[in-house]
């Protein structure tokens, strides 16, 4: 069995974060309000009323955080750019002060030998655009492409590759269908236009970026879907769930069509939002890489209650759980990647794992060390599964673990800790955990081993 040390030469090691989860400084240097700034003020929206107003104060401490990255020996850093810093109302004047921050960050990263991999949208839409309908409005897709152009004009001389969207599925479901994330709409299936408009925004932005010679990725959170039994009803429910979670966000990009959503009573115009020529706009620019965020598989059964959905989620039993309660199934990553290769064949671009990690209840011991062995086990298992997928012929170019530092975990506030580095949110003191040293040593050991098969191409690998 191949293991993580068998990952190809040139394989890119990284960590991931997102703007609202780490930056703080929400009113600084002309930043406008985002949907998250308003959502966190809603009573009960976030555990214990936590907000991202200060978060990890990364906006002021980015040099220290880049030093932590340098200490890991990373190839790349995936972070997100806050749209409301760059264009506070989403449509009006550009805010140079906001762009300046990312300019400083990019230079700091390059000085540390780390390639910046920015995500343009990690859920923090300018509130002014939400007031005009947010991603339910087609117009937002065009504003997104303008924003992409503004950013690439400023940073494109130093940034080779870009991720357009983070997890459009989660944003649609949590933000627009269930209302547990900003902007907090509970529209159920009427949220589907938010899927199409995000994908349209991706396509329009991808065209801008690729015209300028840049590499383009999207980060989809994908999950292997397990039917709860072999009963035809469970198998059909699993197929319906797979269409919504996985295919809805990958088929249009790679195959130029939406999947069959008839189990939802929805046509392939996604609630009337798809116009002639749109799929072309989504597919035509092409993708240099598919970003995959993987956390766990999903087990699906036929619905028991008539809630209008053609599936019900079922528990995965007999596996460890993270502090968040998510099942730990490392081999699900191999299964997912091999499955993507089987489904899309030569239409599948090279893959980068843009997120993978787990929350652990870890507080510093009296001696100041943080023993997060469950995180080490999680990362090791998933990296071994990744090596197994590569050995089966899947082209995977890099791995960005979620996350560098403990941060604002959306509706969970600061209660779930995903970092390789512990953050004391009272003092902002950073303490590298045991997993930090483990990851650093793994990267060094992988680089030091006799070179195997090389992997080049996207993501700036030489
Ligand atoms: C990502 O979302 C986000 O991109 C990132 O901002 C976030 O901080 C990070 O992950 C950690 O949450 O019900 O047990 O089957 C992850 C989206 C959605 C993945 C819920 C796991 C279900 C777990 N997640 N999902 S379970």
Image: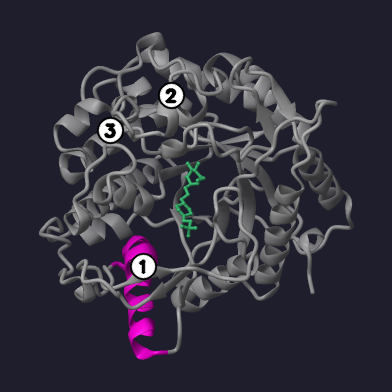
Residue at 33 percent across and 33 percent down: it is 44
Q: Earlier in the sequence, mark 3 or mark 1?
A: 3
Q: Residues within 10 Å of mark 2 (few under 14, many from 20)?
A: some
Our reading of the magenta stretch's main secondary structure is helix
Most extreme residue toward the bottom, as rendered?
Answer: 231
The disc placed on residue 154 is 2
Q: Is residue 255 visible?
A: no
Secondary structure under badge 3? helix
Q: Is residue 166 visible?
A: yes
Q: Earlier in the sequence, mark 2 or mark 3?
A: 3
If the image is split into quadrants, where does the N terminus sit? bottom right
**Where's residue 212, x and y in %?**
41, 39
Most extreme residue toward the left, as rendered?
Answer: 272
Mark 2 CB near ligand 1 (8 Å cut): no
Near-viewer residue (405 or 303): 303
Q: Is residue 55 magenta?
A: no
Near-viewer residue (287 or 230): 230
Q: Quadrant of residue 403?
A: top right
The disc placed on residue 247 is 1
The magenta span reads 231-256
Image position of 176 (left or right of 242) = left
Residue receiving disc 3: 146
């Amino acid at each position: 069995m191949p293991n993580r040390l068998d990952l190809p030469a040139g394989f890119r090691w990284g960590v991931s974060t997102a703007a609202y989860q780490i930056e703080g400084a929400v009113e600084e240097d002309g930043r406008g309000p985002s949907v998250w700034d308003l959502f966190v003020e809603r009573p009960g929206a976030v555990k214990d009323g936590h907000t991202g107003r200060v978060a990890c104060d990364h906006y002021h401490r980015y040099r220290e955080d880049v030093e932590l990255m340098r200490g890991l020996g990373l190839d790349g850093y995936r972070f997100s750019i806050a749209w409301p810093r760059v264009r506070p109302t989403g449509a009006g004047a550009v805010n140079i002060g906001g762009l300046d921050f990312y300019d400083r960050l990019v230079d700091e990263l390059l000085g540390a030998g780390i390639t910046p991999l920015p995500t343009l949208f990690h859920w923090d839409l300018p509130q002014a655009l939400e007031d005009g309908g947010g991603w339910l409005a087609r117009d937002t897709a065009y504003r997104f492409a303008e924003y992409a152009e503004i950013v690439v004009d400023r940073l494109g001389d130093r940034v080779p590759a870009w991720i357009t969207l983070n997890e459009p599925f989660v944003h649609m479901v949590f933000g627009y269908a269930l209302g547990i994330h900003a902007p907090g709409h509970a529209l159920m299936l009427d949220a589907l236009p938010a899927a199409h408009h995000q994908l349209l925004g991706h396509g329009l932005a991808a065209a801008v970026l690729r015209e300028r010679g840049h590499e383009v990725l999207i980060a989809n959170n994908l999950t292997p879907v397990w039917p709860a039994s072999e009963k035809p009803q469970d198998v059909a429910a699993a197929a319906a769930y797979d269409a919504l979670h996985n295919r809805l966000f990958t088929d249009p990009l790679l195959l130029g069509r939406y999947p069959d959503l008839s189990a939802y009573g929805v046509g392939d115009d996604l609630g009337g939002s798809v116009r002639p020529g749109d799929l072309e706009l989504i597919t035509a620019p092409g993708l240099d890489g598919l970003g995959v965020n993987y956390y766990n598989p999903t087990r699906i059964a036929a619905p028991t209650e008539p809630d209008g959905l053609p599936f019900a989620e079922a528990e995965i039993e007999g596996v460890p759980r993270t502090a968040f309660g998510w099942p730990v199934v490392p081999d699900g990553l191999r299964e997912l990647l091999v499955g993507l290769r089987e489904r899309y064949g030569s239409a599948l671009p090279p893959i980068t794992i843009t997120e993978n990690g787990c929350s652990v209840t870890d507080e510093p011991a009296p001696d100041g060390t943080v023993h997060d062995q469950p995180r080490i086990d999680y990362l090791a298992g998933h990296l071994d599964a990744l090596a197994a997928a590569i050995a089966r012929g899947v082209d995977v170019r890099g791995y960005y673990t979620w996350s560098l530092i403990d941060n604002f975990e959306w509706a969970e506030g600061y209660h779930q800790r995903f970092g390789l580095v512990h953050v004391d949110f009272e003092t902002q003191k950073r303490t590298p955990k045991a997993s930090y040293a483990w990851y650093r040593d793994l990267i060094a050991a992988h680089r030091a081993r006799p070179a195997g098969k090389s992997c080049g191409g996207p993501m700036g690998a030489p």
